[in-house]
Amino acid sequence: AQTVTQSQPEMSVQEAETVTLSCTYDTSESDYYLFWYKQPPSRQMILVIRQEAYKQQNATENRFSVNFQKAAKSFSLKISDSQLGDAAMYFCALSGGYQKVTFGIGTKLQVIP
Amino acid sequence: DTAVSQTPKYLVTQMGNDKSIKCEQNLGHDTMYWYKQDSKKFLKIMFSYNNKELIINETVPNRFSPKSPDKAHLNLHINSLELGDSAVYFCASSQGSVSYEQYFGPGTRLTVT
């Protein structure tokens, strides 16, 4: 079985500041992939960033980057220069085994103007 | 062009009724999913189909029956609706491998009264 844990139900950040969302996971698979998805109030789930477990280099997408610690099974998301449009639920997800995807419970991010 | 579409977006019905939610993707993906998101935003996979074949069938009541007439469609039929079925149901698709991101539909908010 694979699990994904997001220990921060809610976070807040001042506009233009940096915030880090935590995610830990557990899996018995040797080949797996990790994702962060964003769900704004519109309800639409959107991919933020993707990390291959076999890659040591941390993924980066513009203002979004991850800190992937494979040994610690940690996969945190850093959002730099936070913008009002970043306010959303953020879900960490683990994909491993045959099309098995597990989502964390989400972290609600509030951006304060 | 909408990549993954669901109809209807909102569904209000009474207990005991039978209802269906339709999903279509125009991305050429061969894997499709149904997720249930409860009131606490927890996202849980229900079913996964690959090339019209059922791959994942999580612990879901038999009242829920997915049907995939072709690779581009995955419909969800729910019999004898219960209050606890009230949730947002998301359809998603992916390229088929665990390494690929999932593209989500806009969700269907089901309210059972």
Image (spheres, coloured by chain):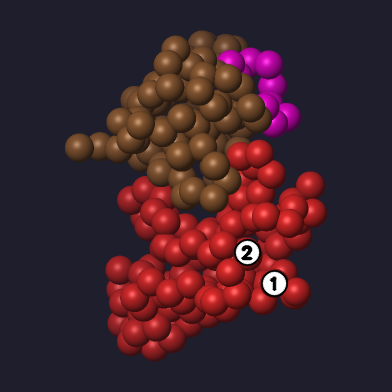
Chain colours: A red, B brown
Foreground pick, B65 / A110: B65
Residue B83: x and y in percent read 59, 27
Q: Is residue B60 magenta?
A: yes
Give the camera-side residue of A3 and A52.
A52
Which region is colored magenta? B57-65
**What residue appears at the point 63 percent right and 15 percent down from the top-left corner?**
B63
Q: Decide: is B27 above or below B43.
A: above
- Prevailing secondary structure class for the magenta stretch in the rendered image: loop
Give percent across and percent down for residue B34. 53, 32
Q: Which mark is residue A50?
A: none
Mark 2 or mark 1: whose residue is earlier in sequence: 2
Residue furthest to the left in view is B1
Disc tally is 2
Q: Chain of mark 1?
A: A
Q: Residue at x 66, y 39 (%)?
A: A98
What residue is shown with label 1?
A: A70
On the question of residue A4 being in view, the answer is yes
Cα gap from disc 2 to disc 1, whole angstroms: 7 Å
Residue found farthest to the bottom: A17
Residue type at mark 1 is Lys
Residue B53, horizontal then vertical, whole percent: 58, 20
Q: Secondary structure at mark 1?
A: loop
